[in-house]
Amino acid sequence: PIKRLRPSLDPAMASSLAPGLARKVKKVLETRVDSPEIVACLKGLSEVYDENTPAARRGLRNSIERRGLDINREFLEASGHAQQALSAVDAQLEGLLLCCARIASALDGSRERTGTLLRETAKLDDELEAVEGRKRMVATFLVDYQLTDPEIAALKGEDVTDVFFAALARVQEIHANCRQLLRTHHQRAGLELMDVMATYQETAHERLCRWVQGECRSLAEEDGPDVPQLLARAMVALRARPVLYRYCVEEVSRTRHNALFRRFITALTRGGPGGMPRPIEVHAPDPQRYVGDMLGWLHQAVAGEKELVGALLGEPVEGGPLALPAPPQRLKGAEDGEDSAEAGALVVTGEGVQDGGEAGEEDDELADPSQVLDRILDGVCRPFKVRVEQVLAASPGVLAAFKLANLLSFYRNTLAGIVGSDAALVSAVAECGAAARGSFDDQLSQRGERLRRSPPPPTDTLAPPPFVAEGVQRVIELLEAQAGLVDADGASAGDTEMVLSAVVGPVIEACECGAVMIGEMLEAHAAAVASSGTEVAPPPPAHTKRWASRAYLINCLHAIQQPLRQFPAAVPLVETIAGRISQLADEVVRDETGWMLSNTGVAEVRELVALYQGHHAQQRSGVGGGSAMAADPALSLSVVGRALDKLVDAVSATSEPVPPFDEVQVPRVRAALRSAYTSAIIEAYTLVYMVVLDPANGYRNPKASIRHGPNALSAILGGM
């Protein structure tokens, strides 16, 4: 390593050196040996400067030059190799340039040769795109305005399947599309396509009509068949052709009419398969069972036929592909001259294109399902009416006729809710019900007339005669039958009241006639005794009572009223009878008390007292009317006292102060009669007694002339 030089110079030495050398030495000494460049040079020098000897120092320059020369030689050798590589690269680049020039020349030639081809290719591409567009347009046109081969085969084939209906729907869709096409300038094409589609549609509808008629004939062989889905869709499709549709509807009504008639006759005479269920006519001896079974069978058959007719002729089935055709529409003027002139004289209809001048009126309205059902059910009306008339001709009895009338009325309302009130079957059932009600009314009228003409005589004990119990039992049976057979809508309060009055009215009239007979028999007995002068057979003791006629009526009315209390429908009648019983009881009490008071003179006194009290109330003066009352000879104290004492003596003279009214067999009414009689007697006695005791009436010392007060009379009569 080279040792670092000391930057110091002796001045004496510096002055002895030559000026040039001195500058160099000074420059060397002033050089910074710690700079990066000096450090790097010294490091490179240390690699070639091995020993620091005087000889090495003297040959340092040569060493450095040799070192530089060696480095230059190495650089020349290395650059020679690089020069050779660059020469090779340059040769390759020259070759590439030649190739590129040849390629460019070839491309220029090719471009000149293919220019025409490219122009032709672009032209062909444009033409191909236009052809593809036309192809798509044609495909769309075929989809919207043409049938496929399978669809045409389905329309012309023998079988009617879902494919057939899909093809028929496709025809109608194309027909509708053609109508839209007619509104454009393609009217001629639209008319031609509509004519083709109308031909397909006409052929398909005719085939469909024949198929439907065949299927309807097969339905006639089954009882309550389920309507096939295809048949229902076929009927919907035929609505577009009213004439064909009407043919099919007539076939349905005819076949079902005959089938229902045969089924009804079979159910009446032969019954079900193997005899089960049994024939309905087996129960002919029982009118209600017989007619009820026929009505039940008809009700079930009506429900089945209505379901079948509704499935065939009702609203379009779910998923049906067809809709009713639109009404005919005359085309508006078109844009093109010639086509417009033609279109102006044409009418588009659901069956194709017709001349507007020759287009006739629309076909008749479609068949009404309710009318079709009515024609089907008409087949069983006559057999049913004949059998009901036979039952009524046999005089089934009052109760049986009433039950039949109610049963027929109930089924009339039920069937009217299913098929309508104007249906022939409903009218037939209503006529039978009216006939049954007429038979019932006639029998009641005859029974009532017999009772009115020949009322049974009253019994010896005044008990209700047997015809009363019979009439009540008949009413109970009728009410029970009505409650069991007729719902709330089947009868009204007026009907019930009419039935009750028709049954109970003659019975009550017969009882009233019997009550009149009691008085007539007593008069006849008295006349016989007076004419013969001898004793004849006396009348029954109960008949000799003054209240015998009214007691007989009370007993009969109570016998009618009591059993009817349990029926709500008979409440008005029960209340009417109760009012009549109360009226009769009041009459009995009034007559008996009047008889007793008249015989004792109290009645006359009470009437005069009432007159004086009324006169006093009208005058309203300070002078009391009592002085006038005491001064009246007819109301003197002695007269009044005798009348009151006579009443007490008459009551106490018998073992029974109060009439027992034993002829009245109703304990409650009998007790009410006794109580009312006692109250009336005591009230009359108390009224007169209190008038006498009133000082305003002018009576002096009245108690001395009247032996008994009202309490004594009350004690005698039973403490009332």
Image (spheres, rainbow, N blue to C red):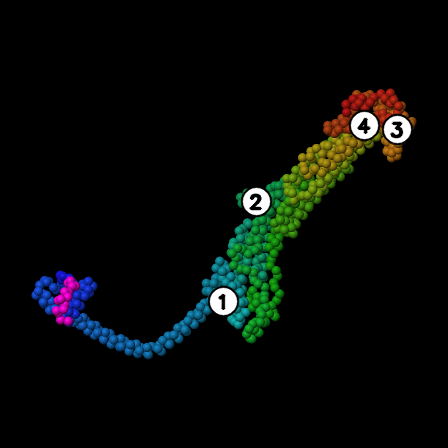
Q: Earlier in the sequence, mark 4 or mark 3?
A: 3
Reply above or below: 479 against 695: below
At horizontal 11% and vertical 64% (from top left) the residue drawn is 49
In the rendering, at what x and y percent does residue 324 appear? 56, 60
In the rendering, at what x and y percent does residue 521 appear? 81, 30
Front disc: 2 or 3: 3
Which residue position is annotated with label 3? 626
Disc 4 to disc 3, C-alpha distance: 20 Å
Disc 1 to disc 4, C-alpha distance: 111 Å
Disc 2 to disc 1, C-alpha distance: 58 Å
Front disc: 1 or 4: 4
Label 4: state its secondary structure.
helix
Which residue position is annotated with label 1? 145
Q: Earlier in the sequence, mark 2 or mark 1?
A: 1
Which residue is more in the foreground, 391 or 115?
Answer: 115
Taking the image as shown, residue 302 lies to the left or right of residue 595, namely: left
Front disc: 2 or 1: 1
Reply above or below: 577 against 350: above
Crowd class of label 2 (few under 14; some 14 to 19; many from 20; radius 10 Å): some
Residue stretch rendered in magenta on the structure: 5-19
At horizontal 73% and vertical 32% (from top left) the residue drawn is 558
In the rendering, at what x and y percent does residue 95 appear? 23, 75
